[in-house]
Image (tube, rainbow, N blue to C red):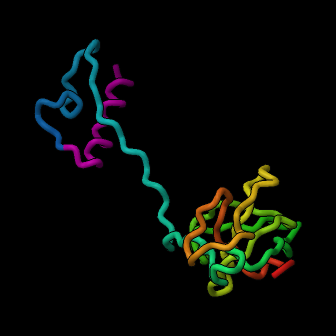
Amino acid sequence: MRLFTASACAMTVLLAACGAPASEEDPIETGEFGEDEVVETAAIAPPEEPVFGVDARPVRVGFDGPEFDACGSYGEITGLNPDGDNFLSVRAAPSSDAEELDRLTTGTGVSLCEEADGWIGIVYEASGASGTSCGTGSPVSEVRAYDGPCRSGWVSQRFVELIAG
């Protein structure tokens, strides 16, 4: 009985903290319930998703015009510290405060599509999906957000070595 009373008290604190109004007839609040009585409680809402300081910014393609490839250059991830994390975070916007979308390792090939303040908008194959055509080597009619079959995001320019373009 004491264990059940302690549980009921804990629920009272939780419900009060959630702003649930207590009434005089509430068996949890008054402690007036029988041993066989089942007391239903309200569900506690899960925590909200983390909020990041920067809104997502899609990578855009087509800056070189309708006669040229959607992304004008190709590069590889390089310069990562093998004694550190040894990965490069792909972000949802050109900022270290943006949500991390993925992690790339040294040697990963990426299409370089857009630049913004030391960040490069890239398009790349998902891990384990080798041979996928991302569509960045073909022209597009106008500048637009990348919407192909591959992944895209933003990486720090200092970890990308230009290979072609």
Q: Is residue 67 magenta?
A: no
> Which of 40/151 is in front?
151
Q: Is residue 5 left or right of residue 33?
A: right
> What residue is drawn where x is 28% and y is 12%?
36
Identify the residue shown where x is 57% and y is 65%: 99
Q: Is residue 23 visible?
A: yes
Q: How many marks?
A: 0
Q: Main secondary structure of the magenta part?
A: helix
Front-lying residue, 28 or 92: 92
Q: Judge left or right: residue 152 versus residue 57.
A: right
Q: Which residues make up the magenta segment? A: 1-20
Q: Is residue 20 left or right of residue 57?
A: left
x and y percentages locating residue 2 in the rendered image: 35, 23
**Looking at the picture, how far across and down is residue 21, in whole percent?**
17, 43
Q: Nearer the viewer, residue 114 or 48?
A: 114
The image position of residue 114, as x and y in percent, is 65, 80
Which quarter of the figure has residue 148? bottom right
